[in-house]
Amino acid sequence: MTLPDFLDVVDSHTEGEPTRVVVSGGPPLGDGPLSERVKTFRENFDAYRSAMILEPRGSDVLVGALLVDPVETNCAAGVIFFNNTGYLGMCGHGTIGVVATLAHLGRIEPGTFRLETPVGTVTCTWHGNGRASIENVPSYRYRRDVTVEVPDYGTVRGDIAWGGNWFFLVKDSPERLTADNVQRLTDITLRIRAALEASKITGKYGGLIDHIELSGPPVSPDADSRNFVLCPGGAYDRSPCGTGTSAKLACLMADGAIQAGQVWRQESIIGSIFEGVARWNHNLVIPTIVGRAFIVAESRLVFDPRDPFREGIRT
Ligand code: PYC
């Protein structure tokens, strides 16, 4: 496949975590279910992802979002999220970034609409002034109090939960949750993730646990908890992580530690905050996450056929 000459994108950050939305162009993925279109993207057009996300045009922290036609007729659009290593089921900060981008482009007014993702439909509300809410896909705790032996570190205990991606959540972080400790936090969470994989500990139906979330006491008096979230590509989430906060809410609801409708304020490792609230739908938790996103750039990414790194630097 060949890349186009250029792609127009809008970059934003949601509570510190960046999102790049493709606003014109993008690969032809057909009109099948979004999960099949992800497969087509991965197998036939992965150079679009690498060219947009990897250096020299992007970075390991960046999440990309491609808007596509939805299958569900009650959805305004479909969206496929991707990062430095592959494709995400859902992305909470990214959805808030998409909503702010659509508002910036004048494509939406304050109000509510639905977006289709490869793992289900989310309901978005644009409140204006950078603020958006997303009612996420149904979330749940799959296993409680799972222990894993991390070589040369020790036993780590956590819950496995789904919030649109699979998470291993450690309630009482064994490490200091401060921004000056992210190197160590990254190292430890990478080792926890490798140990889970080596021990064949997975989400339901063998789902790969690719996000690790450590929680501890907040720094801000306005927050209930602080987290550090390792993302699939090895970067840490600068935001409190929308799908991670959803997984956390599912665990808190399962424990009876919060009640339906109670606000949970989740602080990130850099001190930004998402507000979360959840309700039960039978035995599943429906989380709503509120956060702010701001536009930081409107750009044209250029792919010069003579450029040896036009598909990004794959290491
Ligand atoms: O906000 O859900 C999220 C997310 C996942 C990976 C990075 N951010």
Image (spheres, rainbow, N blue to C red):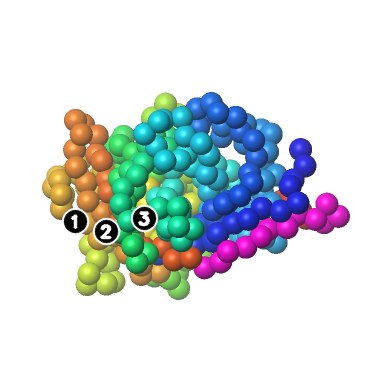
Residue 215 visible in rendering: no
Q: Which disc number belongs to residue 109?
A: 3
C-alpha gap between disc 1 and disc 2: 7 Å
Please report whichever mark, 3 or 1, sits nearer to the chain's N-terminal start.
3
Q: What label does residue 137 carry, if any?
A: none
Between the C-alphas of marks 3 and 1, the distance is: 26 Å
User: On the image, numbered disc 1 is attached to which residue?
Assistant: 263
In the displayed structure image, the side of residue 49 where residue 265 appears, left or right: left
Mark 2 is on which residue type? Glu
| CB atoms of marks 3 and 2 within 8 Å | no
Instruction: Name the foreground residue: 286 vs 229.
Output: 286
| Residue 275 numbered mark, or none | 2
| Spot occupied by residue 3 in the image (x, y as percentages of width and height) | 74, 45
Name the amino acid, label 1.
Val
The picture quadrant where one finds residue 276 is bottom left
Estimate the spatial distance between the alpha carbons at disc 3 and disc 2, rounded to whole Å: 22 Å
Residue 31, given in percent of the width and then of the height, sits at 55, 28
Magenta-colored stretch includes residue 138: no
Count the marks: how many? 3
Locate residue 154 relative to residue 302 in the image: left or right: left
Of the residues tagged 3 and 1, which is closer to the observer?
3
* Residue toward you, 37 or 74: 74
In-image side of 145 versus 279 (left or right) = right
Say what amino acid the circle numbered 3 marks: Glu
Residue 259 seen in the figure: yes
| Proximity of marks 1 and 2: CB atoms separated by less than 8 Å | yes
Q: Disc 3 or 2, which lies upstream in sequence?
A: 3
Q: Is residue 71 above or below residue 261?
A: above
Span shown in magenta: 296-307
Residue 300 is covered by the magenta coloring: yes
Please name the residue shown 30% across and 52% down the image: 111
From this view, report whether residue 203 is shown above or below residue 85.
Answer: above
